Amino acid sequence: MLPHPPAIVRCDGCGHVYWLKDAQKIGELSLGEKCESAAPPEWQQAEFVHEPDEGGYYRAIGRGMARTREEEKEARILAWWKSNEPLRRDLNVMPSGIDVGGRQANLECLISLLDEDEERDRITKAEILRELGRFEEALATLGAVHQGDSPLFARQIERFCKEGDKLVKRIDLDGERAERRPPKRRPWWKFW
């Protein structure tokens, strides 16, 4: 039930963006210990980190932070999700302030990283194509979806494609309705 720290973080001190898994671990507190009383004083001086903004993701990816195809795929998915955040705030319009060119370039690269043999990747590809307004390609991709919960997702994506709707949508697991996601608050993290 506790929130998970982001996989990619930006240091507030120097601005460097990196994989949290690559950070040097200098210590650990037990669950329930208060940081102020249990942490050594030098930990108190550690810089705060938080998830990068949309542009921060694009810059980090462009500088080669992903060392493998899987890391690039994960980083691009996280950048896509970050780019979707402002789109969830208004139900009917594309808000200003979005790096539309960066978003589109990221999604085009992400499509090339998806594995057509994986059901989840086919659904992801269809959703990306829909958000890019490439509805016919999205519908063709959905034609190969058939396992597990995928048909439920596919039907909803298909409906949005047929409506010509490329806005970010929430996929309803009940299958009865789909709507925009409410905005989420992201926690701030301090790495010790």
Image (cartoon, helix red, strand yellow):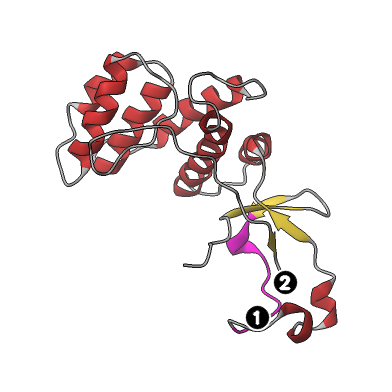
Residue 178: image location, x then y, percent:
32, 33
Please tell me whether residue 188 is drawn above or below residue 165 in the rendered image. Answer: below
Q: CA distance from mark 1 to mark 2?
A: 8 Å
Write down the quadrant of residue 90 in the picture.
top right
Which residue is located at x 61 percent, y 82 percent?
Answer: 32
Check whether the beta carbons of the residues at disc 1 and disc 2 lie within 8 A of each other: yes
Residue located beneath label 1 in the image: 28
The crowd level at tag 2 (other Cα within 10 Å; few <14, some 14-19, many 20+) is: many
Disc marking residue 70 = none
**Amino acid under disc 1:** Glu
For mark 2, give the secondary structure: loop
Residue 87: image location, x then y, percent:
53, 29
Disc marking residue 192 = 2
Q: In the rendered structure, does residue 133 fall within the stretch colored magenta?
A: no
Residue 117: image location, x then y, percent:
24, 40
**Amino acid under disc 2:** Trp
Q: Nearer the viewer, residue 165 or 99?
A: 165
* Range shown magenta: 19-30
Which residue is located at x 63 percent, y 40 percent?
Answer: 57
Q: Nearer the viewer, residue 88 or 113?
A: 88
